[in-house]
Image (cartoon, grey):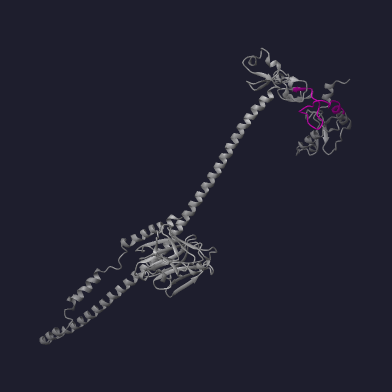
Amino acid sequence: MVDTFSLDEELICAVCRDIFVEPVTLPCGHNYCEECVNQLKRSLTMDEEDETSSQHYMCPLCLAPCDVRIHLKKNIVLHNILEKYYSKRSTGHVCSVCKGQQKLPAEKSCLNCEESYCTLHIMPHFENSTLRQHVLVSPISNINKLCKSHGKELELYCQSDHTALCVYCMLPSEAKHTEGHSVIKLSDATQYLKDTCQAKLSGVRVSLSEIKQCMSDIENTAANSKKNLEDQQEGCTSFLRRIKLFLDFEEHAWQKRFSVDLLQESRNLKHRSERLMKLSGRLAEAQEGLQQALTIQNPLLLLQTLQNADWGDIYESEFCRCIIKEVREWSGPKPIASAKIMPLFEALRRTFSGDDIKLNPQCAHPRLKLCVESGSLWLLKSTGLPDGPYCALGQDTLGDGVHHWEVLVEDIPSWTVGISYAPPQGKVSSVVLGSDEASWGLSYTRSRGQYCAEHGWFKFSFTTAAPALPSRIGVFLDVDSGILSFYDALRLEHLHTFYCSLHAPVYAAFSINEDADREGLAMMRVINPEKNQ
């Protein structure tokens, strides 16, 4: 019978040092794996001096040249021998290292490497000094069932070290498991291990729950932080837009003031120029008369001429001295005093603090129900009370300086806001905002989608590009400059500005119009912009 180990060596490829895979035969008669021959061909380099040598590769065993163009045929005999060899030894455990589809049967299993090896691949464990220390056993499927120290089946469990043991681990020489340690059968440790696993699982679930809660808290915190930042951004943007709107109003106000000052200075300059021209004419007449007098030789005639002249002492007269003094002292238009500048900063402060407009129950239509504390007014359903206009006035007059308030009008189909002088005998029922010279008003009618600015004979209707209905109207009043401006407080869009000359105290005025009467209950509310951001 052929020796098995010798046969194994005859089936080894000289290139890869492993069992043949798809063996082919070179012209010299030596056999190699087909892939190993292909590697020899790929590693072939071109020889620039000898072009013919580049067409050949050498047999690794005998160095015989082989033409790369020759198609090598499969060694059928060797291939059949390999198949029979595999089929004969394929029963049982196979080598973990062999490549190819046909793996050689395992001769030994290494407990330290946790691998099984065939006769060829187990050789390093006999040749290497380190690998010789490994524990080799007969081939087994589950290497983990054997003790790595003794090669025996693991049958015990140490509860102290949480380690599986074999019976040899309990010998006196293995003192670490003979005293003080709790050792039970591995089969009895199943429930103990499951209980331990269940306890750990419970801990993991608690940790996961805590992590999930932390993630939820983080997400909520992030969402709240995002909302706070967005609110701050919106508030800052709104604040800056209000500043721009205020500066636009003040720009118009100061342009008007400068126009008035410029007109006044122009008049003063014209007046001074006229007086100087008049004085210049008088002095020219005096100059001409005096020059003629110098030519008179007759003393009596000279005396009579000087006595009869009305220009003789013109340069010493009070009229001449006053004009000259006035002109010399005039140094052009006076700069704006700080007393006029300070109201601008005060107006800026008040613009962003807003006015607390209190409604006056004594100056309201009978069908309007007022709540002074909240600044709200309702139009009640008709109960035999007189019809509109349904108007109400503020309680306090709007004095000098800048005033600013806003009105919620979202649920009202038709409304008017503005200012008004005090009505005669306090009869607010006679006030129709904007219909006379005593009031200014901006109205809106939902059915027409149209605004209307009115004051006496002036009436201007217009629409805006905003698709949404107005819900919050801002009113800006600069009493000193006579500027009354209306704007959409949500979009901060300018609507209309009146330039008026106020000669008496005015009141904030509000009206719910007759169109609202037909739709039932309607409510308007006056708010302070600073307190209702």
Q: Magenta includes 122?
A: no
Res. 408 in view: no
Q: Give the range drawn in magenta.
A: 84-109
Residue at image coords 66%, 18%:
183
Give the residue furthest to the front: 384
Q: Quadrant of residue 484?
A: bottom left
Q: Magenta includes 87?
A: yes
Q: Quick check: 512 left or right of 302? A: right
In the rendered view, would you say 319 is above or below 228?
Answer: below
Q: Position of residue 99 (x, y in %)?
A: 78, 31
Q: Position of residue 472 (x, y in %)?
A: 48, 61
Residue at image coords 16%, 80%:
312
Res. 380 in view: yes
Q: Quick check: 379 left or right of 134? A: left
Q: In which quarter of the image is residue 149?
A: top right
Front-lying residue, 199 or 254 = 199
Front-lying residue, 393 or 276 = 393
Q: Where is residue 119 in the image (x, y as percent from the top left)?
A: 79, 23
Q: Where is residue 192 in the image (x, y as percent from the top left)?
A: 66, 24
